[in-house]
Image (tube, helix red, strand yellow):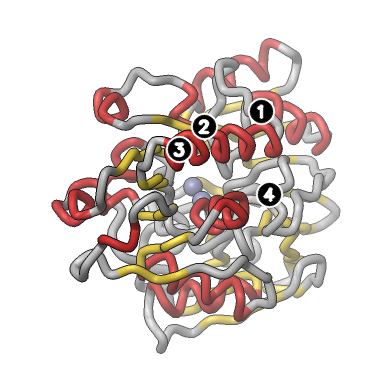
Amino acid sequence: MIQFTSKGIYCIPGNFYLDPWQPVDLAIITHGHADHAHLGMKNYLCHHSTVGILQRRIGRDIQVQGVAYNDPIHINGVKVSLHPAGHIIGSAQVRIEYKGKVLVFTGDYKLQDDGLSIPFEPIQCHELITESTFGLPIYRWDPITTQNDRLKNWILSNQSNKKTSVLIGYSLGKSQRILNAVADMGTVYVHESIAKLNEVYTNEGIKLPSYQVIDLKMDTKHLERQIVLLPPALLDTRLIQKIPSLAYAICSGWMQIRGARRWRSADAGFPISDHADWDGLLQAVRESNAEKVYVTHGQTAVFAKYLNEIGIQAEEVKTDFGNEEDIQTVFTETQP
Ligand SMILES: [Zn+2]
Ligand SMILES: [Zn+2]
């Protein structure tokens, strides 16, 4: 039913692709992150809430059809439906059914409920294509309340030291989570690229706390002791130096290990991730009841090997998906 091609994951009877990285006629897109939603597709199909993100990131004039979760459509005799992936707004797993056989492509996902995206829904299938970005046993996330408490305590100590708390997080998904978590600690100032994506959330009826938009080219004196939310790309610019007496923290799953050179200059790191951790990946695989698992993204070799060891037939698959939380991506992210 599925073929892994140089353009992307191809559904043979349906004649469509899942998150292809080369131009094709019909692309089913799991979510709006740049490594999954590429330019140049003749037709896009995605969840309703992803439509606005694709239009913003790819172009207003794209051919795009939005569908709801759990609302099957038929494409060339293949039954296709989208199901919540809990990763970011509109993120979906794709369920494909043909002649009694079911395959699920997870896209990116997490099992923790971040309070903003619709929580991950386990789906039974014969074959599962899962991501494995954090597919190493060292990656285990704390409960979200614990993560948020740490963040808040750090802000509190900055406030008592007369410092401005600067939080660095990916602009789509992560930033809205952080905003939601820290809004009761003071005025939150967000970079305009984040504000634009906040609008996508509010347009979709997801309530976000109030915030101010900052222009770092203007006077920044008023930011003193406040909370500032910036996308990773800003770290490499001089603009960040304009923020008075700042302490900055990076929010990413990679902060679980403080090994990477670039991280060390940060004042703090918070392992807050929109991906499943080791236990989450295993749980999702088990709950799918799949006879065969294909592993993409990140730690494919380790995770596939482990699944085989515990008696689940698995194979790693090479795809072009990156990772928005990746060290490289985090520092090269451009405007949405
Ligand atoms: Zn993603
Ligand atoms: Zn991804």
Q: Residues within 10 Å of mark 3 (few under 14, many from 20)?
A: few
Furthest toward the bottom, the residue is 61
> Amino acid under label 4?
Asp
Q: Tell me if label 2 and label 3 are in contact, CB under 8 Å.
A: no
- Earlier in the chain: of badge 2 and badge 4, it is 4
Q: Residues within 10 Å of mark 1 (few under 14, many from 20)?
A: few
- Residue 150: horizontal and vertical position, in percent? 58, 32
- Residue 77: horizontal and vertical position, in percent? 74, 71
> Amino acid under label 3?
Ser
The image quadrant of residue 47 is bottom right
- Earlier in the chain: of badge 3 and badge 4, it is 4
The residue located at (28%, 59%) in the rendering is 334
Q: Judge: label 2 CB < 8 Å from ligand 1.
A: no
Real-space Cα distance between discs 2 and 1? 9 Å
- Earlier in the chain: of badge 2 and badge 3, it is 3
Real-space Cα distance between discs 2 and 3? 24 Å
Q: Secondary structure at mark 3?
A: helix
Quadrant (top left, top right, bottom left, bottom right) of the C terminus: bottom left
Real-space Cα distance between discs 2 and 4? 14 Å
Mark 3 or 1: the one toward you: 3
Q: Residues within 10 Å of mark 2 (few under 14, many from 20)?
A: some
Residue hosting label 2: 271
- Earlier in the chain: of badge 2 and badge 1, it is 1
Q: Tell me if label 2 and label 1 are in contact, CB under 8 Å.
A: yes
Q: Secondary structure at mark 4?
A: loop
Residue hosting label 4: 114
The correct choice, above or below, for 249 with respect to 57 in the image is: above
Residue hosting label 1: 142
Q: Residues within 10 Å of mark 4 (few under 14, many from 20)?
A: many
Residue hosting label 3: 160
